[in-house]
Amino acid sequence: MHVTSEAAQKAIDGALKKAEETGTRMCIAVVDSGGALKAFYRMDDAWVGSIDIAIKKARTAVYFGMPSGEIGQLSQPGKPLYGIEHSNDGMITFPGGVPIVDDEGFMSGAIGVSGSSVENDDLVARAGVETIGVCDLPEHPWRT
């Protein structure tokens, strides 16, 4: 099951609203459950470098079914996933990427946001997801 084009746009609109409320300039990417780019928006004056980061945050979240920041905690030196950010053509392991999960626990994609502090990136990403589903993960692993 993949996030629909309509849902992806709705998530971007929700993220844009939160970005405007926080006075930030963001790049916002939505990927489907396979990690393919479904929708993208770059706000005026958002950094060019944030384009790639937003996409990679979304892919990181969907590839592992958890927020990108959680992967970051597990990938610190001495932790079990140290070095994982070098896999899958590069991942981003700090906050700002969150899965899109429906009420039944099915993951249909993920959103990634970049352009401000990681705290703001994560806040904006979660605002986008909350318009179409949830980003809290179920107790059990799911399948796409």
Image (cartoon, rainbow, N blue to C red):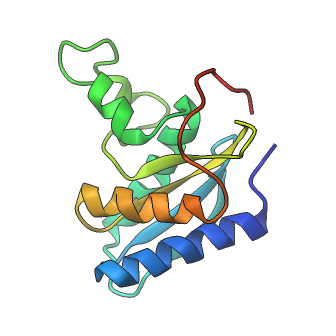
Q: Is residue 118 above or below residue 45?
A: above
Quarter of the figure with residue 79? top left
Image quarter hosting the N terminus? top right
Q: Is residue 131 above or below residue 17?
A: above
Left or right, 64 with respect to 76, comes to right
Q: Residue furthest left?
A: 77
Left or right, 14 with respect to 77, comes to right
Q: Residue furthest bottom?
A: 44
Q: Position of residue 41 (x, y in %)?
A: 53, 75
Q: Position of residue 125 (x, y in %)?
A: 45, 60
Which residue occupies 38% across, 73% down?
26
Name the one closer to the observer, 116 or 128: 128
Image quarter hosting the C terminus? top right
Left or right, 144 with respect to 70, comes to right
Which residue occupies 68% across, 65% down?
8
Q: Position of residue 20 (x, y in %)?
A: 38, 84
Quarter of the figure with residue 24? bottom left
Q: Is residue 48 visible?
A: yes
Q: Is residue 42 visible?
A: no
Name the one closer to the observer, 121 or 83: 121
Q: Could you tell me how many numbered marks the image carries?
A: 0
Which residue occupies 28% across, 29% down?
73
Q: Is residue 61 above or below residue 82?
A: below
Q: Residue furthest right?
A: 1
Quarter of the figure with residue 118? bottom left
Which residue occupies 62% across, 53% down?
31
Q: Is residue 124 above or below residue 85?
A: below
Name the one closer to the observer, 90 or 109: 109
Q: Position of residue 69 (x, y in %)?
A: 34, 40
